[in-house]
Image (cartoon, grey):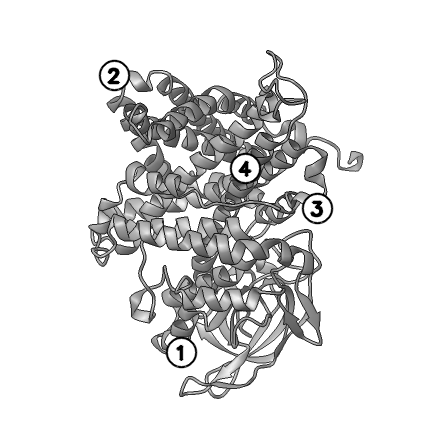
Amino acid sequence: MPVYHAPIQDMRFVLHELFDSSTITQLPGNADFTPELMDSVLEEAAKMAENVLFPLNQVGDLEGCVYENGVVRTPTGFRDAYKAFCEGGWGAMAASPEWGGQGMPIPAAMMVEEMLCSANVAFGLYPGLTHGAYVALSHAGSEEQKKTYLPNLVTGKWSGTMCLTEPHCGTDLGMLRTKAEPNADGSYSITGNKIFISAGEHDLTENIIHLVLARLPDAPRGVKGISMFVVPKFLVREDGSIGPRNGLQCTAIEHKMGIKASATCAMSFDGAKGWLVGEPNKGLAGMFKMMNTERLSVGMQGLGIAETAYQNAVTYARDRIQGRSLTGAKAPDRQADPILVHPDVRRMLLTMRAYIEGCRGLAGWVARELEILNKSTDDEAKQAADDFSSLMTPVVKAMFTDMGFEIASLAVQTYGGHGYIRDHGIEQYVRDARISMLYEGTNGIQALDLVGRKLPQDGGRLLTRFLDPVMEFIDAHADNAALEPFLPPLQQAIEHMQEATGFIMENAMSNHDEIGAASVDYLRLFGLTALAFVWARMVAIAAPKAEEEGQGQFYRAKVQTAKFFMERLLPQTGALLAAIRSGSTTMMEFEDAAF
C-alpha cells in the first residue's frame, strides 16, 4: 500500500522563511492570517488529506466512475469524503468572505492544494473546477449572477465546470461551433456538443454550473466571436431554490489512462437555457481567468503527485534489500543491503527531491505575487505582480507537470518490476500524472505562450520581473562564502537563458518557425534557471542554520540537495541552449512524405 505524509516542515519553510509570511499579513484583509494560523490550517489540511482522501485514492482508481442512463456515480466513499471536505470549509478557503469564503492567502491555499493533489488528485478535480468557475464568475459575472451562483459554489453545495473543447476543436477555439440563440426573456438557447468536460456530471452536488463557450448568431469568425454563458444543470428559481432540469445531459464518460475517479464527460446541450457572462464576443477573456487559475492548479497536481511518488520511492529504497554496496557491505547482518546504498538509486531519489523542493519554492514565489496582485493597493506593486505571474503561469504549468510525470516514472524505476504491477500502487501515479501535461493547454502550447507571447510583450518587460531580482540577489551575495559554490552555476544558467532569448528574438523576426522549434527547450531552460535561483535563495537561509540543534539536519539537507541540483541537474541548460541554437532547419526541412 502506498504511503503519504504531508511535508509540512518544508511547506512552513517556504511559507515563512523563503517568502516571509509576515509580508502577506500586511496586505489589506490579511491581518488575521498570522503565521500561527496558517500553520494550524496546514496541520488540519494534512489530517484531511492523509486520513480522508488518501485512503480513497486506490479505491477511486480501481472502481472509477460509473455511467448509466445519463447518470454518473463516483466511486465508493467519494460522496462522504466530499461532504466532509465541504463541512470542513476547505472549498471555501481561498474564496472571498463577501461570498462566504475565508479569504485565506494564496500561498497557504496553494500548499493545501498540493496536499489535496498528493492525496487524491482525481477527487481534487471536483472542488478545483468549482473554484475555477467561482474565479471566472467573480471577475466577469454580473452582480445578479454573482449573488445567484457564488455562495453555493463557495460552500460546495453546487459545483462548476468549464466547457470549451468540442470533438473537432481543442487548442484552436476559433473553430468552435456551439450556438447561442437569444430568447425573448434575455436568456439564450445553447446548442452544441462538448467533450473532455471534467466533473461534467456526478453525484456529489445538487447542481452543476457549467460555463460554456458558444457563438452568438452575428458573432465574428474566429476567437473574436466567442461568448461565455452560465448554464446550470438545474435552473435556479428567483428565491434561489432548484428548479426544473435544463436542456443538457452527459452522453458518455471517457475510459481513461488515469484519474479514473474524475468524471470526464461528453456533454450535449440541446437548447439549454443559459445567460451571457460579461460582454458579447468577449468570452475568451473571461474564460482565461478560469483557465489561468486552472493552469496553476494543474501545475500543483504535478508537484503533488511527485511528492507522493518520492515518499514511496524512499520508503521502498530503505526496505528493499538487493545486492551489496559497491564499496563493501553496509548491512553485513543481512543477506543484502538496502537498495538505498546504490549510487543510481540515490541519483534517482535526489533528482526527485531536488525538483520537488525547488518547484515548491517556485510555487511559493508565484503564490506570493498573486496575493499581492489580488490584495495590494499599490498600483506599481500590482503591475509587477501581474507581469510576473503572467510570465510564470506557463512555466509552472508545464515544468511542474513534466517533472511530476518524470518523477512518478523514476519512482517506478526505483521499485523495479514491483513498481510496474498494481500491488504497490505506484504505477497509478504515472498514469494519473500523464494527463496534467495535456489538459488546460498542452505543455507545447504553454511553451509557445511563453516564447511567442510573454517574452516579447511590452518590449520584454515581463521577463525583467524575473531577471532583475535574480541579478540583484547575485550582486547582494557576491561575498557570501556559503553561496560561493552556488552563484557561478546560477550566473551561467542566466547567461544561457539570456543568450537563448536573444537568439530566438533575433531569428524569429525572419522565420516564425524558430519560435516553435525553440519553445519547449526554452521553457525547460527557463524553468531550470528559476529553480536554480530558488535553490540559491534557500541555501542563503539554510546554510547559517545547518548546525542548529533540533533542526540542523533539515537545513543541512537543503544545502546538500541544492548542491546536487547545481552540479547534476542544472548543467542541462548548456545542452538546451545548444539545441535552441541549432534552429528549426532540421525539423522543418524534413520531407513530409518521409514521416
Where residue 345 sits, quadrant-wise, is: top right
Which of the marked residues, 1 or 3, is nearer the chain's N terminus?
Answer: 1
For residue 221, side relative to residue 154 (left or right): right
Q: Earlier in the sequence, mark 1 or mark 4?
A: 1
Q: Considering only order in the chain, which callout, 4 or 2, is on the residue closer to the N terminus?
A: 4
Label 2: element kind: loop
The residue tagged 2 is: 479
Rate crowding at label 3 as few (under 14), some (14 to 19) or many (20 or more) other CA atoms within 10 Å.
few
Residue pointed to by mark 3: 422
Can you give x and y, in whole percent of width and height, for residue 307 in the image? 51, 41
Q: CA distance from mark 1 to mark 4?
A: 43 Å
Tally of marks: 4
Relative side of 556 to 69, left or right = left
- Residue at image x 20%, y 50%? 26
175 vs 554, nearest the viewer = 554
Residue 182 in percent (x, y) is at 52, 81
- Asked whether, in this view, residue 301 is left or right of residue 89, the answer is right
Please, what is the three-letter code of the amino acid marked with disc 1? Answer: Thr
Tell me whether circle 1 and circle 3 mark residues in contact (CB < 8 Å): no
**Mark pair 1, 3: CA separation:** 45 Å
Q: In the rendered image, which residue does mark 1 sit on?
A: 148
Q: Which residue is mark 4?
A: 310
Q: CA distance from mark 2 to mark 1?
A: 59 Å
On screen, residue 5 above or below 210: above
Q: CA distance from mark 4 to mark 3?
A: 17 Å
